[in-house]
Amino acid sequence: MLLQTAWLCGWTTLVIFNIVAVWDISLETCQCRYPILLSRALTTDPYRGITLGYCLLSIAATLQLNSSVLSAAFFGFFSAFLVSMFETSAHNALIFVSAALVMWECRPQHFLWTIHWWVTVVGALICVTWLGYSHFELTGQDSRCSWWYLSEYLLFWSMYLLVYWKIPPEAELQDKVVSDRENRAKKIIF
């Protein structure tokens, strides 16, 4: 399977999984189905475990790109979901650094990619402005439930999809593991 195809399949399942997590956890958070902070949904069990598994798959996929920056970014996302976002600021720092690494490594190289990259940058500005405002100006239910959190979802999904452009079209999703049988055959041939 081509790595670009696998990445698109993974991205699609990520979007669906995130929507399900927000749909489920928002009822507890807002007492109705309403947009909430994505990290709030993804750091709640059972979604934390699924998110961690998803991050591991992303790390494995980026290893085929020989990009230590992308591997570090997805390891950062993995680490962010290990720590509690409610007890420390480490979660936010890891998300911020990891997002910056993805944006750096996925700098555009052609027209459509450039448009996608700049849309993601604008989305980041909107999202960060909203999160800053909600953190410093709002308290209680108002800060936990807002349609503005849609900007976070779109930013995260757009940023994750930027990696698609980085993947060479001919790259295949495969391991280079050689079985014992193949090793013995090579020894006999040589």
Image (cartoon, grey):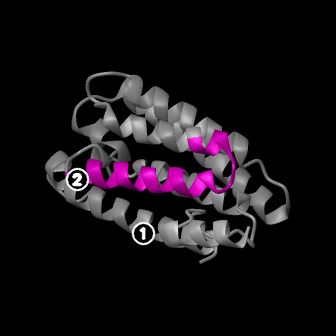
User: Residue at (52%, 67%) from the top-left corner?
Assistant: 179
User: In the rendering, at what x and y percent does residue 190 appear?
Assistant: 74, 67
Question: Does residue 92 lie above or below 183 as drawn?
Answer: above
- Residue 103 shown left or right of residue 111 in the figure: left
User: Residue at (14%, 49%) from the top-left corner?
Assistant: 28
Residue 84, located in which quarter of the rendered image?
A: top left
Residue 116, located in which quarter of the rendered image?
A: bottom right
User: Residue at (17%, 55%) from the top-left corner?
Assistant: 27
Residue 64 in the magenta stretch? The answer is yes
Would you call the spot at circle 1 few (<14 residues within 10 Å), some (14-19), or many (20 or more)? Answer: few
User: Residue at (47%, 26%) from the top-left corner?
Assistant: 93
**Which residue is labeled 1 in the image?**
13
User: In the rendering, at what x and y percent does residue 36 appear?
Assistant: 31, 48
- Say whether disc 1 or disc 2 marks the residue closer to the N-terminus: 1
User: In the rendering, at what x and y percent does residue 118 appear?
Assistant: 73, 51
Q: Main secondary structure of the magenta part?
A: helix
Q: Amino acid at mark 1?
A: Thr
User: In the rendering, at what x and y percent does residue 23 appear?
Assistant: 26, 61
Tags 1 and 2 touching, CB below 8 Å: no
Label 1 or label 2, whichever lies nearer to me, is 1
Instruction: Give the magenta range.
Output: 46-71
- Residue 98 shown left or right of residue 132 in the figure: right
- Which of 70 and 133 lies nearest the eye of the viewer? 70
